Image (cartoon, grey):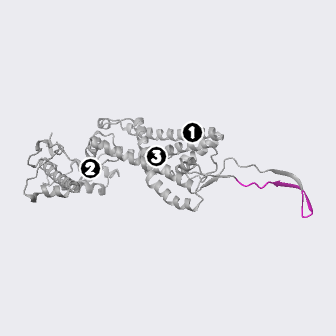
Amino acid sequence: MYSFVTNAETHVLKPLANSNDPQIKDMSETLGGGDKHDVVSRSTIYFRKLILVASYFVIGPVLFRLFGEERDCYDQPDAMVFNNATITYNNVTYTGVNLVENVEACTQEWTFLDGVYYATITVTTVGYGDLAPSTEAGRIFGFFYILYGLAVVFTIINEVAVTVYAALESSATGHVTLDDILNADPKDAYRKIYKRMAMSAVIIVFLVWIGGISYMVLEEWTLLEGVWWAFATTSTVGYGDLSLTHDDSKVFSIVYVLGSVVIMATSLSTLGSGLADLKQEQRRQELLHANLNIEMITKMDLDGDGVDRFEFVTGMLKLLDQLTEEQIAPWSKRFNELDEDGSGLLDHDDLERLGREMEALQEEADAAKSHAHTPKNFMEKFSPTSGGKKKFFGKAPQGHDEYQGQEMKRSPSWTRS
């Protein structure tokens, strides 16, 4: 086994669907760095995402206020009504007339809370229609604001919600090891699918009812109106047939909508795909226990030298429509590039060659960075053309303390363990 040491920039990988697999975790940590630099990189990325989201919910509301956006007041003046009145108009007397006072509607400028509420129902695509820009400046800015919200902010919110949902699903279904899979009862796979579907149904009911009860209390609606509003909200239908008339309701909606819309969508998707998963599992069980014929196995042979484990596994996965040749081809090509001697294995010689290539690439990257940050007179003094030997001065690179002040020698960047 070989471990390759590199100081290359850390790349953070996205969470994998099967991240509970220990091997997947080990490989992902290796690619991601798996050290304090990885933690710093992740922290930086999270901080940047937080800034992107915060800027959306702060800059937008501030600008909409500056644009002078207005909305209807919660409390409108009551018009006076006169029933069965008698009036005289143009010397003509009318009796039994119903008169309604002409009252001008009350409007007020958006508050910062209104702006944040508008940003929330916009980025989640609920769009009730109770708040919308009415000025020319607001609508022009709205084009870019909506695009930024959907392309950037909603993507970040979706990542968070999917992570939360995955944690809930993992706690509900439990951790599964390879031994569990190999020794599992065929019915366990069906039970796992049913558990996921049941969990999704529970989440849907919980989100709708917690929202319905909250709106019933905050807006003094009936329970049916509250549940109806919550379901239209979490499903992003957003009819707008009811309107919020209290600031407390808007504060609750900001938190409720951001936290529930994506989780609701994921739950509905999981629930809807449950039937397809059951059919897929049924097909898998049939193949596992089927009497495989010689003709089918022969067709799995890709190179004419018999069916090996790789060909058998990929062939069965193709039959299950879980793997295609288009998915296999690039990774097969990549393996062949690494397997320089064509042995079919990445042996000691292949790994040693790969280590040298990685070292050369790292040296080129370090040289480029050093040249970019080193003063010109320093480069002239210690360049190879100055007649002197290349030496390390000051602090030696990490892992090469033995070369401090000495002539630099080639040091392999891989170690055997």
In the rendered image, which quarter is residue 249 located in? top right
Which portion, as a residue range, is magenta?
Answer: 87-105
Q: Picture coordinates of residue 9 (x, y %)?
A: 26, 49
Q: Looking at numbered disc 2 in the image, what kind of residue is underneath it?
A: Glu
Residue position for label 2:
9
Q: Picture coordinates of residue 186 (x, y %)?
A: 36, 38
Q: Picture coordinates of residue 215 (x, y %)?
A: 61, 41
Q: Looking at the figure, which quarter contains the C terminus?
A: top left
In the rendered image, which quarter is residue 372 located in? bottom left
| Residue at 39% in and 45% down | 47
- Judge left or right: residue 127 versus residue 298: right
Residue placed most toward the observer, 282 or 270: 270
Q: Residues within 10 Å of mark 2 (few under 14, many from 20)?
A: few
Q: Looking at numbered disc 3 in the image, what kind of residue is underneath it?
A: Thr
- Judge left or right: residue 239 versus residue 281: right
Q: Residues within 10 Å of mark 3 (few under 14, many from 20)?
A: some
Q: Can residue 15 be seen from the camera position used here? A: no
Q: Main secondary structure of the magenta part?
A: strand
Residue placed most toward the observer, 95 or 325: 95
| Residue at 10% in and 52% down | 390
Residue position for label 3:
266
Q: Picture coordinates of residue 229 (x, y %)?
A: 60, 45
- Which circle's residue, 1 or 3, is located before the other in the chain? 1
Compared with residue 88, is residue 61 higher up or lower down, i.e. above or below? above
Compared with residue 414, is residue 338 higher up or lower down, i.e. above or below? below
| Disc 1 from disc 3: Cα separation | 18 Å
In the picture, the disc for residue 124 is none
| Residue at 31% in and 55% down | 324
Say what secondary structure mark 1 lies in: helix
